[in-house]
Image (cartoon, rainbow, N blue to C red):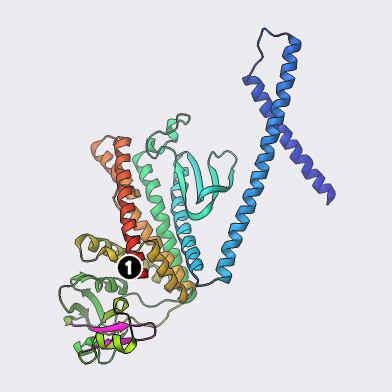
Amino acid sequence: MAKKQDEVKKQQKTQKEEVVNKEVKKTIKKSPAKKTTTKKVEKAEKVEKVEEVKENIVVKEDKKEESALKSAIELVLIIAAIIIILVFFPNTVIWNIVVLLLILTALIFVHEFGHFIIGKLCGVHIYEFALGMGPKVLGFKRKNDPTEYNLRALPIGGYCSLAGEEGEDDGSLPKDKFMCNKSKLRRVAILVAGVTMNFITAFVLLFLISFIWGSNEQASYIGYVEADSPAARAGMNTGDKIIECNGHKLSTWDKLSVITMLKNDNNYYEYVVKHQDGKEEKYQIVPDEYVVLDDETIKITEDHTLEDIIKEKNLDKDKVTTSKLIGIGADREVKHGFMNALDYASKKFTSLVSTMFLILGSLFTGKLGLDALSGPVGMYTVVNTVAAYGLSNILYLAAYLSINLGIINILPFPAFDGGRVLFIGIEAITGKKVDPKVEGYFHTIGFMLIMLLMLYITWHDIVSLFL
């Protein structure tokens, strides 16, 4: 064992000497002695300079080793802290925060990895690919690879720094290494790669959820009708399929749930139902209203009003949650198997994408208010709720957020990937590149608007949380 340690030390010493000798040679070449000096003085100066360079290099190498050791210790401590929190402090405030940060970090990392891998394939120079933000904890470079791979201290996202994202930004690089000098098709491929990776991640997570825990039917077939409910009184039956609600076409329960959240001027929901015999029928159903508590739901009636329930249960009027229901639901049968998991992942992914576009459209038309959106604080409360139902629900939240991140980034709005694709489209139409400075101004303004929106949403989340 001692012999092996000696051999390792000798190898390290030899490697260090090789580095020193290379640096010495470079320094001597760069700093030749003056011709006017004598040969003895010249030789003495060279020897002195060699010793000085050696000493400086040794000090630098020692500092690098100390820094690497310090970084490794910091990394171990961070990982240990995260593990301790996850194992010993479940469902606490700090646990929820750590879980949310880990989910967001993983999703952003996957997104940036998409940009990274396609950027590499397209021959773009990548300065850095990092996991996390803040000070560098650990970093390395691969042989014949100019990219610096870093792990940073704060587990919040990550980034991929490509050369030429906003014009030629480094005079030392060949022009063909800049992203801005690549073909339009390649630039678009690099930009949409992040979104693509988010979508792939969401699909894989949904598949795993169904494969491991099983899944329910996603199509909008009525699985049950509650007795004496508005739906039962209207004549809806088990096996019927809801194909339209309030003028919106639909095929899944996800979309139906979003439609019923939209602003509705009527006191009823209008459904179009396709019966098992193929006939279609339209219903106008006034929903029953319920007070939703942690352990029960209480129906609001003329004889048992909301005020009566608040007094009986000693509830805070401002914090009472109500829900309108017509008394139907999806089939509760849980299905398993590989093919079922594929079917579930495909239908669920398509359904979530469709509902998110519906939500975005409803925000612009005013059918859905900004209070329906959630920022970091709102997502924290969601994690707190979801975590109580187990790992499968946490993975579902991750899949949902991954799709959300992908769709937001593909929107043709400045500062998003879709906004950058939009400028490439303008270039394709006009035949001229947009001035990088002008494009930069648009992205900056877009980013500022997004930050203002986030501040508003976060403030609303905080007010909702504490009031």
Q: Which residues are magenta?
A: 285-301
Left or right, 230 with reference to 122: left
Q: Residue 386 location in percent, x, y? A: 43, 72
Quadrant housing residue 380: bottom left
Is residue 64 something one can see in this rendering?
yes
- Between 279 and 329, the one lying in front of the other is 329
Left or right, 396 with reference to 89: left
- Between 123 and 411, the one lying in front of the other is 411
Tell me: residue 345, above or below residue 272.
above
Q: Is residue 128 magenta?
A: no
Left or right, 38 with reference to 426: right
Q: Residue 318 location in percent, x, y? A: 29, 76
- The structure residue drawn at horizontal position 69% and vertical position 27%, both measured from the top left corner, is 53
Residue type, label 1 = Ser
Left or right, 425 with reference to 13: left
| Figure quadrant of the C terminus | bottom left
Q: Residues within 10 Å of mark 1 (few under 14, many from 20)?
A: some
Q: Which residue is mark 1?
A: 351
- Between 149 and 191, the one lying in front of the other is 149
